[in-house]
Image (cartoon, rainbow, N blue to C red):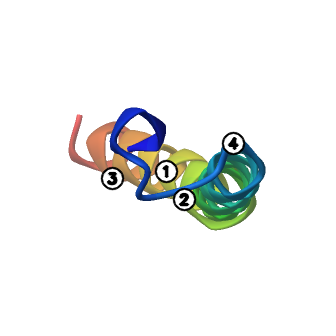
Amino acid sequence: MPAVGKVSARELTSMAALFAGVLLLSGAGIAARYFGRLLPQQKQLHALLAEMVDETA
């Protein structure tokens, strides 16, 4: 876009920084959900499954 005069270098840098920030924030949210909610739930379900297998055996 700077080659055809549609955006200045300063605006391009600002857009890239904004995109990088949004990408990092989104990744942090996904990681927080995974480690904070899904991983403990997975451990709980594995323990429940192991308990149920032990009861039937």
Q: Which mark is residue 38?
A: 2
Cα separation between marks 4 and 1:
47 Å
Q: Nearer the viewer, mark 1 or mark 3?
A: 1
Please tell me which residue lies in front, 21 or 35. Answer: 21
Q: Earlier in the sequence, mark 4 or mark 3?
A: 4
Is residue 48 positioned above or below 50 on the image?
A: below
> Which residue is label 1 attached to?
42
Q: Earlier in the sequence, mark 3 or mark 2?
A: 2
Q: Earlier in the sequence, mark 4 or mark 2?
A: 4
Q: Are marks 4 and 3 in contact (CB under 8 Å)?
A: no
Residue at image coords 54%, 59%: 38
Cα separation between marks 4 and 2:
42 Å
The residue type indicated by label 4 comes to Ala
x, y percent for residue 20? 67, 46
x, y percent for residue 46? 45, 43
Q: Which mark is residue 52?
A: 3
Q: Which mark is residue 9?
A: 4
Q: Nearer the viewer, mark 2 or mark 1?
A: 2
> Total number of numbered labels?
4
